[in-house]
Image (cartoon, rainbow, N blue to C red):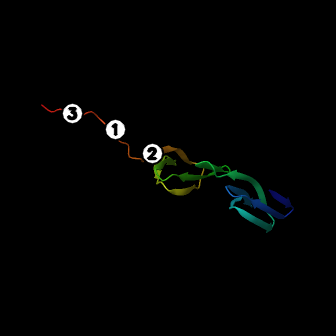
Amino acid sequence: GCLQHGNKGIAVVPLGKLGLAHHLGAPLLLPPGIHCWCQDGVKFDDFVSLDEPVVKLGHAYTLVTVGDEAVAVTQDNGTLKLLQGGGVYFLNHEKWRVLGFISTKVQHLRIKDLVVT
């Protein structure tokens, strides 16, 4: 949870979650653990779960986790970009969107024997 009084606060971010806060309008991402502050302009917003491959972080930011056997298809201001598998990516503005995921697994189809005459 989070306790905040005036310019002081403490947030305990559990494993599997990320804390969202902001300082004078700039976003703050709090990883799992205990976070304390004593500073004007800091405000805790919410916790978000990291269980999903696409996690919205407030209004403008997105965290994307791409599995080992996939690529993420994204659009960054109208330009298509592929995000390689096995990574975590931070999309740093609201016009960089995730369009979907494509599997990179090799698929085998067995076909009948061909007779050439």
In percent of the image, x 57 and y 52: which residue is there?
64
- Which residue does the numbered mark 3 point to in the structure image? 114
Mark-to-mark CA distance, 1 and 2: 16 Å
Q: Amino acid at mark 2?
A: Ser
Q: Residue furthest front?
A: 113
Where residue 5 sits in the image (x, y, percent)?
Answer: 87, 61
Q: Secondary structure at mark 2?
A: strand
Which mark, by number, is residue 109?
Answer: 1
First in sequence: mark 3 vs mark 1 = 1
Q: Residue at x 15, y 33 (%)?
A: 116
Amino acid type at circle 1 is: Leu
Which dot, 1 or 2, sits closer to the camera?
Answer: 1
Q: Mark 2 or mark 3: which is in front? A: 3
- The answer to which image quadrant residue 109 occupies is top left
Residue 21 in the image, given as x and y percentages of width and height: 73, 58
User: Mark 2 or mark 3, which has the lower sequence index?
Assistant: 2
| Image quadrant where one finds the N terminus | bottom right
Question: Where does the image place residue 43, in percent across and percent down from the top left?
Answer: 78, 58
Q: Tell me the CA gap for discs 3 and 1.
A: 14 Å
Label 3 environment density (alpha carbons within 10 Å; few <14, some 14–19, many ≥20): few
- Marks 1 & 2, CB-CB < 8 Å contact: no
Q: Residues within 10 Å of mark 1 (few under 14, many from 20)?
A: few
Task: Quadrant for residue 40, please give it.
Answer: bottom right
| Mark 1: secondary structure | loop
Per the rendering, the mark at residue 103 is 2
Tell me whether the residue at label 3 lies in contact with that at label 1, contact meaning CB atoms closer than 8 angstroms: no
Of the numbered discs 1 and 2, the one sitting upstream in the chain is 2
Q: In the drawing, what numbered circle is on residue 51?
A: none
User: Dot 3: what SS?
Assistant: loop
Identity of the residue drawn at 32% across and 37% down: 110
Mark 2 and mark 3: Cα distance apart in space: 29 Å
The quadrant in which the C terminus is found is: top left
